[in-house]
Amino acid sequence: MELRIEGVGARLGGRWVVDGVDATPPPGALTGLLGPNGAGKTTLLRLVAGLLPPGAGAVLVPDDEHPGGSSGPVPAPRQVPVHTLDRRRRARRVALLEQESSASVPLTVREAVALGRIPYRTLWGSDPDERAVDRALSAASAEHLAERTWATLSGGERQRVHVARALAQEPELLLLDEPTNHLDVSAQLSLLAFVRGLGVTTIAALHDLNLAAAFCRHVLVLSDGRLVAAGAPADVLTPALLREVYDVDAEVLTHPRTGHPVIALSPDEA
Ligand SMILES: Nc1ncnc2c1ncn2[C@@H]1O[C@H](COP(=O)(O)OP(=O)(O)OP(=O)(O)O)[C@@H](O)[C@H]1O
């Protein structure tokens, strides 16, 4: 999806917690959203999801109802602010996996994942694509959990089910808030490899800089609500940037096999 984040801001609790962010995440690729605790990552994801109307600027997505646009041989697609799409249309196009999301109702995993299909249900409540839930369970490596009840799952298993529910929405834009939370290292790698391979425009808030460097084509770095850097991980994740944003000493090495940056943090000597 061609997504344009234009001067977007959100004012919460009397201050701009996201402030004038401009970004164009590359379509069809995985973008990492980085920044320290409280930098505004979750708030920016909620703005991009259209759940929080911006206090300034706009998040623009292609208009799927009136794709026409201006005249000319190749008309530019019209763009509309995401928060103005009606809920059902938005839920077919944009999925947000929230941090620490919970499901308090006594559902099985299959039923929880099927919640992601609600925007597609017919008037009679049936799903026009009955295989979608199975595909999503399989993609999130959660088929074996399908008949378990939510309450009996471990933290990592719950996270897989959340991912499956977001995938069941079959969105054009996938927004993941710390998707690797609770996952063991192997599951972290396979989840991000899978998401990257989807070819869906995805923005993932990540705390692990090495995962971001290994899997993201593009990274956005927030600090105190402002976008302080954007670009390819190798260009953005420099020792100077890490010092400025996270106040840490780091060496940035090159992975001997893949060539992507590897961030080696050093303990403060002082
Ligand atoms: N509803 C709210 N009212 C007041 N302040 C809020 C509200 N929601 C978030 N904030 C503040 O906005 C700032 C950004 O919060 P946000 O959750 O977006 O940060 P984050 O980068 O996702 O942080 P973390 O890495 O800790 O999850 C924080 O200082 C937070 O306390």
Image (cartoon, rainbow, N blue to C red):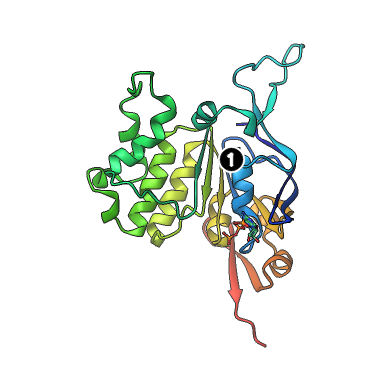
Classify mark 1 as within 8 Å of ligand 1 or not, answering yes or no.
no
Q: Dividing the image into 4 quarters, which one contains the N terminus?
A: top right
Q: Relative to 261, is 11 above or below?
A: above
Q: Is residue 84 left or right of residue 145?
A: right
Q: For the point 37% across and 44% down, which residue is it?
A: 140
Q: Dividing the image into 4 quarters, which one contains the C terminus?
A: bottom right
- Residue furthest left in the image: 147
Q: Is residue 269 visible?
A: yes
Q: For the point 56% across and 55% down, which residue is it?
A: 212
Q: For the point 39% across and 24% down, which residue is it?
A: 121
Where residue 267 sits: x, y (%)?
60, 80
Q: Which residue is mark 1?
A: 51
Q: Is residue 93 left or right of residue 102?
A: right
The total of numbered circles placed on residues is 1
Where residue 226 sits: x, y (%)?
74, 54
User: Where does ligand 1 appear, by image quarter?
Assistant: bottom right
- Residue furthest bottom in the image: 270
Q: Relative to 60, is 55 above or below?
A: below
Q: Along the line of sight, which residue is nearer the eye, 210 or 125?
A: 125
Please state which amino acid type lies under the numbered disc 1. Answer: Leu
